[in-house]
Structure formats: C-alpha cells, structure tokens
Amino acid sequence: MRPRLLLVLLALVAPVLVALPSGGTAAATSGSLVVQVLSNRADLVSGGDALVAVRLPAGVDPGRVRVTVGDRDVTTRFAIRADGRYVGLVDGLEVGRNVLRATAPGLTGVAGDRAVIVDHPNGGPVFSGPQTEHYRCQGSARDAQCNEPATYDFLYRSTDPLTPDLQPYDPDDPPSDVATTTTDQGVEVPFVVRREQGYQDRDRYTILTLFQPGRPWRAWSPQQQWNHKLLVTHGGGCGASYTPGSPPLADYSGTFDGAPLMTPSYVTALGLGFAVLSTALDNTGHNCSVAMNAESVLMAKERLVEQYGELRYTIGTGCLGGSIAQHTVANAYPGIYQGLVTTCSYPDTFTAGAQFADYHLLRLYFEDPSRWAPGVVWTPVQMAMVEGHLSHVNAVVADEGLFKAALNPEHPCSGTVDPEPGDPATRYDSETNPGGVRCSVLDLLVNQLGRRPASVWTPQEQAVGHGFGGIPFSNTGVLYGLAELRAGTITTAQFVDLNAKLGGLDVDAQAIPERIAGDPASIARAYRTGLINEANHLDEVAMINHGGPDPGIAHDYAHAFWTQERLLADQGNTDNRVMWFGPTPLIGDVHWAGEALLAMDRWLGAVEQDHGPEPLARKIAADRPADVTDRCVVDQAADACDVEELQVLQTRLSTPRQEAGGPLANDIVACALTPLDRADFDFLLVPLTDAEWATLQATYPDGVCDWSQPGLGQGPAETWLRYDAADGGPAYGGRDLPPVPADSGLGTLGPVWTEMLAK
C-alpha cells in the first residue's frame, strides 16, 4: 500500500464507523479528546459546514465538553448519538482556515484537541484551479457562483413492468401503483425516492435515496433502509461547456436507455438501499476535465455524508466518457471510488484523442482524391486497413461525432451563445473575435495542460497576449500504413503519397501541411495529471468492464484492452479487473449493468470483511468472488472465454498508430524519433526509387518513430494534484496537495481500511 494512497483512503473512503467509546460517569478521568473531521479531508471541505466527531476518553461526561470554532461556541451542535459517538454538524465556517477546538474545562488530566478545517466556496473551486471567467449561471442563481438553495421532490417506481424509470410522486396524493422493495439489509419499504437537486462548483448535482416521507433523516440517524453504499453515475462524450448542465443518471448515456423491461442500474441500486449521486461535471461530454470530474464528485460526496451519513464504499458506473471519468479519476484521485463498472470503455481522453486526430487527417486525404498523386488510387478496404479497422465508417463516425466538436474552438458549446443585435460576441472566432471563449477541450483544460509557449503563437494568440491551451499529442515521425506496406496490401506509391501529404492540425484544429509537433510541456503534463491514464494507481480499485461488438461508431472493444495492457505493464496482472463480452452491440447485454452492479457489490463486500494482513491491492484481487470472472458470450446460451479466438467478434481492432508500429496499449501520443534509414525498407520486393526516398526524407527531416522507446513525456500520473498556485493564479500541470491532515477522517474507516492503517 503506497503511503500517500493510504492517507487518501483514510480521508475519503468513509465506510460506516464502529461505535467509539463515549465515556461514562466516573469521577477520575484521563486521556485526550480526539477531533475527527468525518465528511472530507479537513483541508478540502466546502460549502461552509463539516461533520465532526470528538472521541471522548473513558469517564468523561459529554456535558463537560466544549467545542468552538474560533471564538464561536458550537457545542450545541454536538450530542451523543445512537451509536455512542459524540458527533455534530458544524456550519457557519468561513472560507479559508477555521480552527475547531474541543476541550473539557475543569477536568484535570483531559487534554483538548483541535482540527484546522480549510473551507472552500460552495461555488468552487477546491483543487481544480482558477475557474473560467466567462460563465453563464442558470436564471434562478442567487449569485455569480450559480448558488441557490437545494430543492427536494419525490419519485417512485411503478408496479407496471413496462415503466422501468422512476415517476413523479406526490406524498399528499400518492399513486396506487407504488412498488415495494426489500433492501440488501432486509428492510422492506415502499419504492419511494427523495431527489435532492442543488448547485456546487457552479453546476448541478443530484442525490437520490429511498425515503419514507414525513420521517426524519440526519447524518447520525439515517432512515433504516439506507445501506450506506453509494453509486455514482456518469455521462458520455468529451466536451467543454460554460453553463450548468444536467447530472446524468442513465446507464448508457443515450445508448439503449429507457428500453422497456430493462431496469436502469441506478434504479436497481436504489431498490437495494444504495444512495445514488450524479453531478453535471462528472459528465465528460459536458466537462472533459479529470480534475473537475473528481472535484465535483468529491464535493457532492461531502454533501451526502454531512446530510445523510457516512459511507461504506462507492461504485461508479458509465459508458464511453463515463468509463473515462471513472478510470481517470480513480487513477489520479484514488480513494474517491472503490469499484468501477465500465462499458463502451476507454482508458482516457487523449490516447483516444490521438487516434481520432489521425482519423481526421486520414479522412482529409482519403476522401479528397484530388490530393492523390497521379496513378495513386485508394480503395475503401485499403483506407480501413491503414486506419486499423474493418470499415472506413468507423473513422467517419469517430471524427464527426467525437473529434471535431471536442477540438474545434469555434463550435457552439453551451454558455457561448450567438449574440443578440448590439450585444458583444462571446465565442471565439479566429477572424473577428480572437479573444472570445474557445470551445475546444484543450482550453477548458488549460490548468492541466498549460498554455502554448510564445515561440509558437499564432496571430490570434499574439493578438490576445497569451497562448491557447497546449496541444498534448503529436504525429511527427509516424509512418502511417507501415504494416500494410509490409504486407503488400498497399503500394509504395500509396505509402509515400499518404505520408507526404497527410500533414497536421494547428491549435484551431485547422489542417496544415506540417505534422502536429505538439507542445512538449503539455504532452508531459497530460501524463502527469492523469489525462493520459497509464493505470499506475488502479491496483486498489475493483473493476468490471462489459461490452459488445461495435457497429462502426468508434467504441470497438480494443479500447477496453488498452486498459488491460496498461494494467499488465504496471502491475504484472489484471486480477482486479474482469472483462465481459456479449452479443449486444457496445454493452454486451442489456441486463449487464444491473448484474455488474450486484457483482461489484459482492466483491467490495468481501474485501470489506477481509481482516487479513495483506495490503488492499492483494485483497481486491484475492477477494473477487469465484463466479466473477472474464465472460465471453457468443450467444445467450454459450460461454466461450477464448479471447484469442474471439478477437474479430470482440472487435479488438487496431488504430492508425498501431498499424504504424505503435504498441498494443496505444499509450504513446508523441513518439521518440530515430533517423530515417533506407535499410529499414529492405523488405520491399521493389526497392524505393530515389524520388520516393527523397520524398520520405523531406517528410521526416527529424526522423521516424522508434516505438521501442518510451514516448516523449510519457510517465505515470501524480495523484491528488491541485491547480492553483500559492499566489492564487494557475499552477499549470498541477502541484501536490499537502499531506492529509492527521485529524481528517480517522473515524471514517471500516475494518479493512483500519487494519491497513495499523500496518
């Protein structure tokens, strides 16, 4: 167990506490009070409140204890609760440093204790760094940070099997078709759900729980149907937005959602007694930033702990961008999740982004025969081969549906509306408004990637006096179609013409003759910040990935194998991850989201009960239930887990860079270069002509990719980075958060985590 990860888990996993001794009535006492901030790391608290426990030595009368924040007495917030602990929810914290003290005046031999709570605005940020200046709050916002009071309403599940989603519920006029549910703790209640909706970090969050209207619920006394487990749902895509969005709840982000007789996994979770949480900022289609994904979920989890009670463990779920958010947050901010359920899987944004950038450039060449040299003709089959797929359609869909909108700074992202007559323009236009808001995700991620250096500024960057968000990938040195040239499926003329004319993209995503050089500092920062996920911190999280064949929309199962390859490279095994493949396109089986949730719950429950001496990573692997294994379903009746034989069915397809000699893990976005050597083409039956060789030399003046070497800037993610500098500006590429305060969440550990700490 890495020391830093242990400290993070110590503060954030937050399982249910065992009862702590509350003291008695003995006259003779000794020992120390111990203050524990339960709801979050004491230095990452937000919203002006914190759930705090004070451990009392044996014999100390709780009535003799005083708790203060600064000069303010908050003792009345505390009491001995039903589990025997002395706990209170302290509000009214000031933004910045707050010193909470617990003392026992007049009692000799009893030392006091304190905790320094650093509060952050409810509107953020906490650690994601300076916020974008241009932002459009909802019309009902009370201030410029989009704050407004939370609202509550009720939903219910119908007994009608054709209505799987939750329906509006009026406690004063309840419907006649309310289903009942029995939780995994054996509590039977009507399937009525309270939905809390509010704003944090300038965006929306929602929390859902089974709820019995009219009955109280406090953090230290939750309603009995809650099992203290949490499911976090995510959305798909990759984009930038500058106005609040909607928290996603559906399993597949628009794919197969709302199908009759298919129960969404969040409804299944609610019925078992889980709380369900989602934030608009954990939807990568709305916000493609790992730091903001993590920050928003952390803030909402804190809200849940303070208002509903402490957690045992947290499971994430989601498709496409939902898999990206889970993988990257778990890797860069370990401890936020304990289990991941992923589908339509990708390990991160920018290794797929480099693949899709290649598609975009290949399309510009392949689909414009006027660019082809005389005598050069490309068939659709040859195009697909160079792209690493069975059909050119995959490149088209990935480019049109994912790449163009994500990288084009002029596309109409939310919050940058076209102006009314007489109003100033807000959106970037390279010709008329170079200082406008850029809708490229590279600019949304400027705190992580940094700005482009002055040496490469475009006229637009010069006009505004700063660089735009750095470009975190390169195609310099890539020999596209090398595998096909070796196999003889394309000609030397095709190979040379393609590579000479492919070119690259500038910072505005416009085609240029030169290859993409990328910004070296931004490339290194993409790895450092976890935007590129080498899976080097994923050994302490359990993972179930399920998927199916891709019908040509850029979700082939190879992306799930990228994560497998990276896990193997980092930890030598994939024992903490299972892969399910089935016949339903993209997801494998419409019922697997719920089945995977149940399997993950059993898996984490087993780890939770493991009191052995092994570190957490070994427990995750060893405690996986025997029936939770890799699954390859050819049809609904047959299991055939021979991965090698099912590669074609599984659409474990290739990529343009893999066809150029790149690694199976597809984790090099900028390759190391080696001099171009004519002898490397000795495999050709017909040698390169002098003219062809001269063309290649002009195309690769600095050399070609040496895939045997690590990529430029390639390295592991650093965990728990913050993106604000000490002077309040941005800390491009991040800086370490300080060590977890000793008074953070010592009481929030379940048995497994407590034993790990003792080791």
Image (spheres, rainbow, N blue to C red):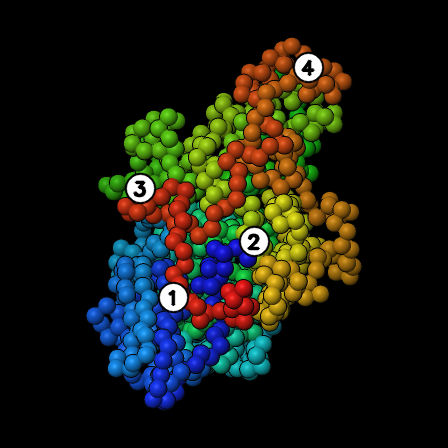
Instruction: Identify the mark at residue 743; answer none if there is no mark.
Output: 1
Q: Nearer the viewer, mark 3 or mark 4?
A: 4
Q: Residue at x 29, y 82 (%)?
A: 107
Residue indicated by mark 4: 688
Q: Earlier in the sequence, mark 1 or mark 3?
A: 3
Q: CA distance from mark 3 to mark 4?
A: 52 Å
**Residue type at numbered disc 1:** Asp
**Residue type at numbered disc 2:** Leu
Quadrant position of residue 304: bottom left
Q: Position of residue 240 (x, y in %)?
A: 42, 46
Quadrant position of residue 465: top left
Residue indicated by mark 3: 426
Q: CA distance from mark 1 to mark 3?
A: 45 Å
Q: Earlier in the sequence, mark 4 or mark 1?
A: 4
Q: Nearer the viewer, mark 1 or mark 3?
A: 1
For label 2, the SS is loop
**Does the residue at mark 3 contact the one at mark 2 (Cβ under 8 Å)?**
no
Nearest the viewer among 504 and 62 is 62
Q: Earlier in the sequence, mark 3 or mark 2?
A: 3
For label 3, the SS is loop
Q: CA distance from mark 4 to mark 2?
A: 46 Å
Residue indicated by mark 2: 538
Q: Nearer the viewer, mark 1 or mark 2?
A: 1
